[in-house]
Amino acid sequence: MKYETVIGLEVHVELATDSKIFCSCSAGSYGTEPNMHVCPACCGMPGMLPVVNKRVIDFGMKAGMMLNCHINRTTTFDKKNYYYPDLPSAFQTTQWFAPIAVKGLVEIKTSTGKKGIRIKQIHMEEDAGKLVHDIREDTTHIDFNRTSVPLIEIVSEPDLSSAEEVEAYLDRLKTLLRYARVAECEMAHGTMRCDVNLSVRPEGSNVLGVRSEMKNMNSIEAIKRAIDYETFRHIDAIENGTEELVQETRRWDDIKGMSFAMRTKETAGDYRYFPDPNVMPVVIDDKWYDGIKSSLPEFPEVRFERYTTELGLSEYDARRLTESIALCECFEAACKVTGNPKDCVNWITSEVMSILGVRGITYDQLKLDGNALGELIKLVSDSKVSRVNGRKILDAMFDDGTVSPAEYAASEGLIISTDTDLIDKVVAEVVAADPKSVADYKGGKEKALMALFGKCMRQLKGNCDPQVLRKALIAKINE
Amino acid sequence: MKLYISENPAAKSADISRRIAADDMILTSSLPTTAGSRMLKGYMSLFGAEVLTRLDNAGFTLAGKANVGEFAVDLLGETSYFGAVETDGKLSNAAAELLKAGEVSAVITLDVNGYPRRAAAQNGLISLKPTYGTVSRFGVIPAACSGDTVSIMANDTAAVSEIFAVIAGHDDKDGTSHPEAVCETAKTAAVPIKRIALPVNLTEGTNEDVKGKLAAFTASAEAAGIEVVKVESDIIAVSNIAWNILMSAEVCNNVSRYDGVKYGYRAENFSGIDELYTNSRTEAFGELIKSVIIFGSETLSADKYNKQYDKALRIRRLIVEAFAELFSEYDAVLLPACSALSYGEEIRADKYAVYTENRFTAPASITGLPAVVCGSVQLIGRAFSDGSLLAAAAKITESEGK
Amino acid sequence: MTLGYLISLEQINQLSLTDRQREEIIAFFAARDAELERLYRFDTADTERMVHVMPIMTVVREDKAVQLFTREALQAAAPETDEGYWCVPRVLE
């Protein structure tokens, strides 16, 4: 018999806010010392009250809109109760009754074509802390930096049927959420995590099989391996009766390449949800809703289309730019200033990307002001600054975001001189000091002219139109 | 007999009219805050309550932290880990005793389940439980958050009004705080109280002393030109049944954080994380709180939620609507605050007596409506009529003999 | 309320009651269940639940990070810490 795999995903995405969801601690928990971003509220002390971070609602709405969801205009928070050392108040504030977004659709592309994946809901919640088990053998160490960092959980319908589709779906989520600038979605940083619900049924059947859930998967490769393994395990159980399948939570061991049933308590699973009396319903009025709606970015494929058709970029260049919305926005702002898309894409894919590489900055982290970049490109294309000095100015703009290319060029003496007296004076000096090169050139050695040209350019600190200098030099020699 | 759990010796020199106490549900950073529980014995908060900051700024001095029942859910304070307060062999209350002894001019209390109103009624004092959301709960030990209200106990209405004027107001740190302008209206006596409803079915089970106080209050009101009309209300009479569901669920949730890990009591002997939790909580919590926890978690369990918790939330709306209907004809509702003016052996022997005795205080707790205890009875008013209630209380109970 | 159910409630709440209190609570629950019948007499099918008693507009906060207290202050009353962490007996994964 042929079988099909039925997969639904619960994807946790950490929102890229500055502060936590209900308190003012920094939300940047990755890679910091333990318990440095903690306050009485997020380490479970009594007396502080939750006050909702507006940007969390903004981002929740944006995520919902990017995934074509219906936004609940009145959204509420609820408490979920359980004991675990990473949960300092013994409850997690989440959304159980009226989540921010419901009923969405995400389109994915795989080798077999396009497919729509339905989104059941997106809810906002606070993250738990981190437990460290490898400092002392008998002790678990607790770090609350991540406690109350805002998350969204994106719950799909069981519409996925292969590891390839899961990968395409996760990629798509990542692209859309990064485009909306709501999240980093980096599995290696823990800013995107995934629970995989999987069952198997005979092909064509519309009855779901027994489901297993694998929690907290944090690498795409592990997810793919786990899906293949679980599919095999389920089919083996059905075909050969190797085990009786039960609905359960399993842990994926990527080193052993196997999943294991997790020990669960009888009473676990009843989280006793109830509405949080301390957080009033969040009512999203038209002004708030429309403001978010109008701030949504164009989708990457729409941009790609526009870049290749309207702006005449090559598919290669358009693909490189649309990898990141930060690159796109910088490019578009620069284009407005210069009116020359090809020039702008050249600068971005060569100079800008090279500096990002050297400095270890990701495309999404690019903070370069596109207007300023446009001004710089224009200075170079208008022959006011040399390309070499242009790169120097760009470096300075990365050092200090307030640098204006024109002012910087002027103050650092990087403007190409149009002072013909100065050029003539330098040319005269160089020619007088190097009669040998002059003689060589006159004797037919073209290279000798380059030596003289280089000397002049050095004395002029590069601030000279090469064509003007060349003309002046030849004229002087031929005098 | 321990009236204070902790004291500020420097307050002795302060003028009595500026000297106040707070019950030990109100957090302070200069003195420990215990919630009357072994769990928080010696607990030093890093910050103090917004109400105390406001009082400090207004020139009041905190004399100490009044003894309180564990998480303020009991009758009068008898479940305090630091001992019950008794006078002449009778159960009393620390806040009330401090006021009667002239130690302080007012006590800031947390009204979770009615104890300040019972204490005021039994001792002939004034207690204002303000409209929910007019006084910040920032820096208050959370118990039943949907009803918890910082309230004021004093010897007379003038002292209560003075404190209320200082502490009422918007606070950004409390997401359930009303805008400033709304809080201001609660301080004025804008709508004079002319007609009072007395739901007689809610006076059932009160003893002769309480009935006598109700009659005396009615007579004084009428003498002051205020009409008192007998009514009935079935739905208000079940307030405490619904409130016990909501209150215990919320308290259960709020005290889950006390687990011996981050601060507070940790058991000496345990093996493994579950024993650490269980031994710490079992040793540090008293019996009433344990019953609240069990009751509250049952009511939230998946198979009981709709039948109990959700039902109680809907009943709450019916109660609010029943009050609104009364307020379309009357300006206030008169209720007893307790079944007796002192608790006898029978009620004291019943560990769970508060779950029924709170039937007088639950109507205002579950609705968030303002309530003033005066003349040993209770007046409940419209939302934001706090000032009007205090003015009526003064007119009715304090006019004689002045 | 059965003893088994009560014990499961104790476990979920990390409590261990004495036999005497178990008896008292089971008796209390019986009385309370009878009381609950008084609630069920009221039809609430068309009544919306009321979580918050006052119609307060949502108060939201601007997204700005502020560190209020140091780790040392937060851990001053901690029963057990090590290298800046709170500590508990090893939790098995």
Image (tube, rainbow, N blue to C red):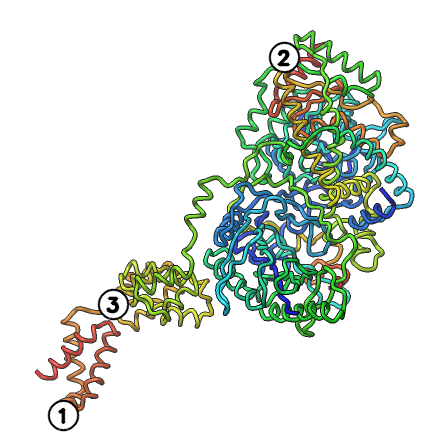
Question: In this view of the protein, which residue sits in the foreground, A22 or A462?
Answer: A22
Please state which of the two labelled residues, at mark 2 or mark 1, is closer to the viewer.
2
Which residue is identified by label 1? A443
Tag 2 near tag 3, CB within 8 Å: no
Tag 1 near tag 3, CB within 8 Å: no
What is the chain identity of the residue bearing mark 1? A
A164 sits to left or right of A462: right
Q: Secondary structure at mark 1?
A: loop
A33 sits to left or right of A398: right
- The residue type indicated by label 2 comes to Lys
Residue A419, quarter of the rendered image:
bottom left
Task: Please give the label number shown on residue B119.
Answer: none
- The residue type indicated by label 3 comes to Ser
Q: Quadrant of the N terminus of chain A?
A: bottom right
Q: Secondary structure at mark 2?
A: loop
**Residue at left offset 84%, top offset 37%:** C29
Task: Please give the label number shown on residue A381.
Answer: 3
C90 sits to left or right of C63: right
Question: In this view of the protein, which residue sits in the foreground, A204 or A42?
Answer: A204
